Image (cartoon, rainbow, N blue to C red):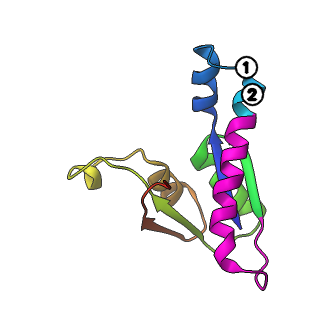
Amino acid sequence: MLLHVMDRRHVDFAVAHELAAREEVLDVMRARAERALADYQAPAGSGIEVMTIVVEGTPFLEIIKKAEELKADAIVMGKFGLRGKIDPYLFGTTAEHVIRGSTRPAIVLPASPSP
């Protein structure tokens, strides 16, 4: 399963600043998310079934909710934060919220953003 959560705060920000109508923002974000998930899915090939899911909400809450709903064996996610040397002492990232809030095992890997 591959999950992408369109962060509601980003949608609200774009709408509040009149960058586009809510549905336009969601359409653009959904298209981008689906392209990214397809890129992650491609290496699996046709022999492995991969489910892709795109939802809108608060990322850590949606990750935890979907993991429970789908009875995931584990949650594997990339950590994209770039806080620097103080990073281990700060709490508040999506990955940290998932680790603290989920009953499922969580594996957090260092990751770099897609180009």
The answer to whether residue 48 is visible is: yes
Q: Is residue 40 magenta?
A: yes
Q: Mark 1 = which residue?
A: 21
Q: Label 1 to label 2, Cα distance in Å?
A: 5 Å
Give the answer, above or below, for where 42 lies relative to 102: below
The location of residue 71, given as percent across then percent down, is 74, 69
- State the mark number for residue 31: none
- Identity, as a three-letter code, of the amino acid under mark 1: Ala
**Helix, strand or loop at mark 2:** helix
Q: Which residues are magenta?
A: 27-51
Task: Check if mark 1's residue and mark 2's residue have beta carbons within 8 Å.
Answer: yes
Q: Residues within 10 Å of mark 1 (few under 14, many from 20)?
A: some
> In the image shown, does 61 or 51 lie closer to the viewer?
51
In front of the other: 34 or 57: 34
For image coordinates 55% across by 55% down, the residue present is: 101
- Name the residue that disc number 2 marks: 24
Q: What amino acid type should be assigned to the residue bearing mark 2? A: Glu
